[in-house]
Image: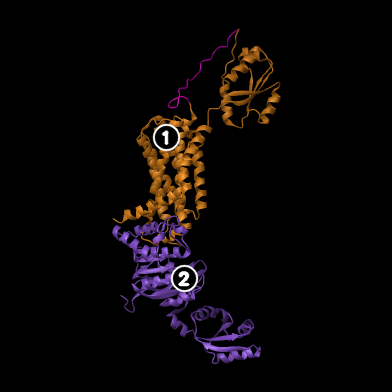
Chain colours: A purple, B orange
Amino acid sequence: MNTPGDFAIRARGLTKQFGELVAVNHLDLDVPTGQIYGFLGPNGSGKTTAIRLLCGLLKPSSGSAEVLGLDVPGATNELKPRIGYMTQKFSLYADLTVRENLEFIADIYALPRREKKTRIEELISEYDFHSQHKQLAGTLSGGQKQRLALACAVLHKPELLLLDEPTSAVDPRNRRDFWAQLFELADSGTTILVSTHYMDEAERCHRLAILDHGVKVADGAPVDLQSSTGMWVIEVLARSPRDASEALGALEQVVSVTQLGVRLRVLIPQDHKHPEQLVRECLEHKSIEASIERVPASLEDVFVATTLKPGKQQ
Amino acid sequence: MMFPTRLIAIMRKELLQLRRDRISLGLIVGVPVMQLLLFGYAINMDVRNLKAGVADQAGTHLSRQFVADLGQTQVLNFVYAVTTPQELEALLRAGKISVGVHIPPDFDRRALDGNRTAAALLVDGADPTIVGVANQLVNVPIRFDTGPQPVKRARSFEVRSFFNPERRTVVNIVPGLIGVILTLTMMMFTAVAIVREREHGNLELLINTPVSTGQLMIGKVLPYVLIGMVQLALVVTVGRYLFNVPVQGSIVHLYIGAAVFIAANLSLGLFVSTVAKTQFQAMQVTFFVLLPSILLSGFIFPFDGMPRLAQYLGEVLPITHFIRISRGIMLRDASIFELRNEIFMLLGFTVVAMTAAVMRFSRRLD
């Protein structure tokens, strides 16, 4: 099933404009089948719009997309039974119970009676709703709601799962469980497209695209992205990190300074040959005592480097 | 067959939600009963006990007898006795009386004359109903105990009242009220139906599933047809036993007429739901339709007596046609076949509104 070159989603030049605002700008996308593909980007970067374009909820202003071999939005109706979609906001019925919601979704996807029954029992045990299947969905906690939404989205065993910031209202522990379920689904052959603004989540994806103002600024496997930022990452441990941050931030060559507790992460383009020296001289000049070390880029550095660069250059 | 599964799923969900919504559930029963009690007891077109004042400047036996006769009609309730017509005017202006009776000093002579009016009625003309009643009082005769009787004029008409011989307002109100209640509840429920799903975010999920627009619309409407029928039964029963309003014609015909009317209202409500952006807007549009439904449908004012423009407006309201059906069947023992034109009109409404709703409903977000 997972032959290389087999793509669940292919998009070319996908663009969506709302009046003056270009929400998604010439997006090219290749999502391999059976993988977890991430959309990483800040709020308003076009993640939601891109997902809505891909499932046919929005009509692109230009460009084309092929999802599961079907033309979108042209063949949206044929696509619908084959995809599962989880909205950013909880979109199940708060005044129905867990089981009633599952039954409703099963009927909407027209599952045969016997299959419906076994599938719902399967999901109730798999997603741990044994003690809560009679509880109204509106009274569930954030993590439980998310679990229910995922259970409903996968009820009809879709080939492709589109998840729009599924864990934004979920605590870290529930997020771990949630991701464990996603990996299980991916192992069974489901392709998953998930948007997030959490670095740790993005790191778990097989591949990811970083979106900024509707533009894809980078894509690839997280490890590859980290090794090809084009930035040196210098970690500075200073006694007075705020002064050091101010001094380094003023340097023309420094793209960004991020404080993490007592440490600073300083990004310098790789066309600069001696980054440590630059930092050391700068701090000595201000007589700030510090230890300096070159470290490998984290995904957050990649994110900062790709999304902040244009701003600094202006 | 895949179609019924999805349709039934939507209907089931709608009923489940309604079952948990205690207030809406209460309104289904509460609105008809409350309105029926309110309209049944409060609205009374037979005007009685108007507050009146008298200025009897004649003070003769004849004039006192005349005032007593006026009081006997029960239309007037004399609460003030004054001495001049100016005082009557003052009382009228102050709103203390609606009718003033002025009997001039030469009342007896005028009464005998026959060419001149004997007394004057001063009427608060701001309310046309009161003027109408006052005009009836003109016919109260002056009774002479002795002496010559005035020549009796033959009356041109004798009025025979069909269908409601006791002239009880409630008999006319109940069939119309069925229309008002069904318009109010049916439109309200469906007008918010789609908007609510949109506001709660459910719609984004639904339009991403294989459920079709038609299944969604019809599945949302059908449960309320049932509820409308329950309301109809409620009003007819309460009207029968509390206000003694009969159903002269066939109850089956009444139900058929109501079913078509309910369908028209629900389709209209659905259309509103596809236009409105919020539940609040949907409510406002509902009331925008409701007010003319009460005023221009013939529910309160006789339809034929309305100005031409108002009649045209009335004709495009489903309730106007239903009131003709319900009054026809309940009061005049008409059959649905005699009223087929009204049925066709309602069917037309349903088709147009439903088509518009399905067309307006977008399965996309842009």
Q: Residues within 10 Å of mark 2 (few under 14, many from 20)?
A: few
Q: Name the amino acid type tagged 2.
A: Arg
Is residue A74 visible in the rendered image? The answer is: no
Q: Name the amino acid type tagged 1.
A: Thr
Q: Position of residue A253 (x, y in %)?
A: 58, 86
Quadrant placement of the N terminus of chain A: bottom left
Magenta region, residue range: B147-166
Name the chain under label 2: A
Quadrant placement of the C terminus of chain A: bottom right
Q: CA distance from mark 1 to mark 2?
A: 60 Å
For residue A97, side relative to residue B44 (left or right)? left
Q: Disc number at residue A306?
A: none
What residue sits right under mark 2 in the picture?
A173
Residue A280, placed above or below residue B178 = below
Q: Disc number at residue B237?
A: 1
Residue B269, placed above or below residue B84 = below
Q: Position of residue B357 (x, y in %)?
A: 42, 52
